[in-house]
Image: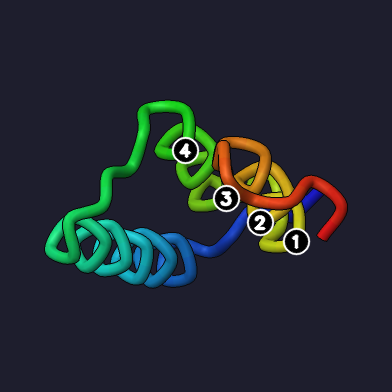
Amino acid sequence: MSTRPTPDQRAARADALARIKHSTEMEGGHVTPETEAIIQRFVDGEIDVEEMIRLGKGTLPFYPRDV
């Protein structure tokens, strides 16, 4: 569980993750609604970055589950 980010931290998280999403889409990738929901939980401070990564890996059909 993460602590609530300050407004500045939340804005920085949202900005960084929006740039990552844009970059992914520019490279021909797609961010699913499920992944966007996980990212939003991180931005809102509900989960920490490690949990975001763990949950995100679970949304990828090709990612080894034991990594």
SS for callout 2:
helix
- At horizontal 64% and vertical 48% (from top left) the residue drawn is 57
Q: Earlier in the sequence, mark 2 or mark 4?
A: 4
Q: Would you place residue 47 above or below residue 15 in this image? A: above
On the image, numbered disc 3 is attached to which residue? 42
**Amino acid type of the residue that numbered disc 4 sits on in the rendered structure:** Thr
Residue 11 x, y percent position in the rendering: 35, 64
Crowd rating for badge 3 (residues with CA inside 10 Å; few <14, some 14–19, many 20+): many
Q: Earlier in the sequence, mark 1 or mark 3?
A: 3
Q: Nearer the viewer, residue 47 or 52?
A: 52
SS for callout 1:
helix
Residue 4 x, y percent position in the rendering: 65, 52
Q: Nearer the viewer, residue 40 or 34?
A: 34
- Discs 2/3, front: 2
- At horizontal 33% and vertical 42% (from top left) the residue drawn is 31
Classify residue 33 by image quadrant: top left
Cα–Cα span, label 2 and label 3: 10 Å
- The tag on residue 35 is 4
